Image (cartoon, rainbow, N blue to C red):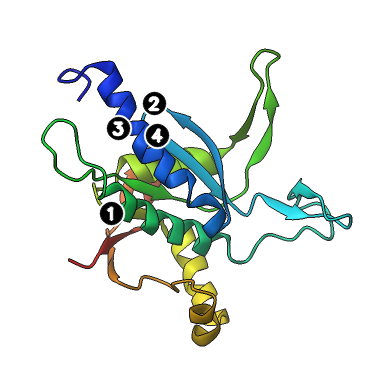
Amino acid sequence: MCKELQPFQVMRMLNDLFSRWDTLLGTYGVHKVETIGDCYFVAGGLFCYDADGMVVVRDRCSGNRQPDPHHARRVFEFAKAMLVEASAVPLPTNGEPVQVRVGIHSGPVVSGVVGTRMPRFCLFGDTVNTASRMESTGVPGGIHISDTTRQLLMADEEAEDCAAAAAAAVDVGGGMGCWTATGGIQVKGKGLMQTWLWSPAS
């Protein structure tokens, strides 16, 4: 795309797209970590409230900061909303709706601020790398997730009462779409990984 368009045209499209996604963050309870080029990186379950009501980074070593049992579902629901918003943004090359690849993986990360100039809150770890692999091996207009995330989504579905979830305006599972097992993909440094692809209903 950058070969066909002026830089300001690409930036204008990305600003429109990213601004739409930014407005969804609070709705789904996910945290925007950073954007790198055309990559939009979010995480779920990073934060909780301490005894004083202050927002703090979750620490699994602390007794009162257990993992958010709904973090996988929050990110998945956000991902579905991302696809909807992307479809409302036209490509400047041909006017067709934007289609994005989304990748999700669940696991531990290390967070912190690195460097002394333009300090930035960052996440590190194999979980980040694997999520990136899920994105790069996904398909436009779909959500590619690891089996780890799929198991968390299934457990969340079983634990949550569907009526209560509907009252909270949260879509449980893969509603309005379908899951397909990929049969496994080769991931550098990890070998064959079982993964799943969610595609919206046509």
Residue 115 as seen in the image, left or right of residue 148: right
Residue on which the image places disc 3: 13
The alpha-carbon separation of the residues under discs 1 and 4 comes to: 15 Å
Disc on the earlier residue, 1 or 3: 3
Q: Which residue is mark 2?
A: 37
Answer above or below: position of 29 versus 41: below
Q: Callout 1: few (<14), some (14-19), or many (20+) C-alpha neighbours within 10 Å?
A: many
Q: Is residue 201 above or below residue 192?
A: below
Label 4 sits on what residue type? Answer: Cys
Query: What is the distance, in whole Å, between disc 1 and disc 3 at their CAs?
Result: 20 Å
**Which circle's residue, 3 or 4, is located before the other in the chain?**
3
Looking at the rendered structure, the secondary structure element under dot 1 is: loop
The amino acid type, in three-letter code, at marker 3 is Met
Q: In screen coordinates, is 40 left or right of 127?
A: left
**Which residue is denoted by mark 1 in the rendering?**
142
Disc 3 + disc 4, Cβ < 8 Å: no
Kindly state the secondary structure of the residue where label 4 is placed: strand
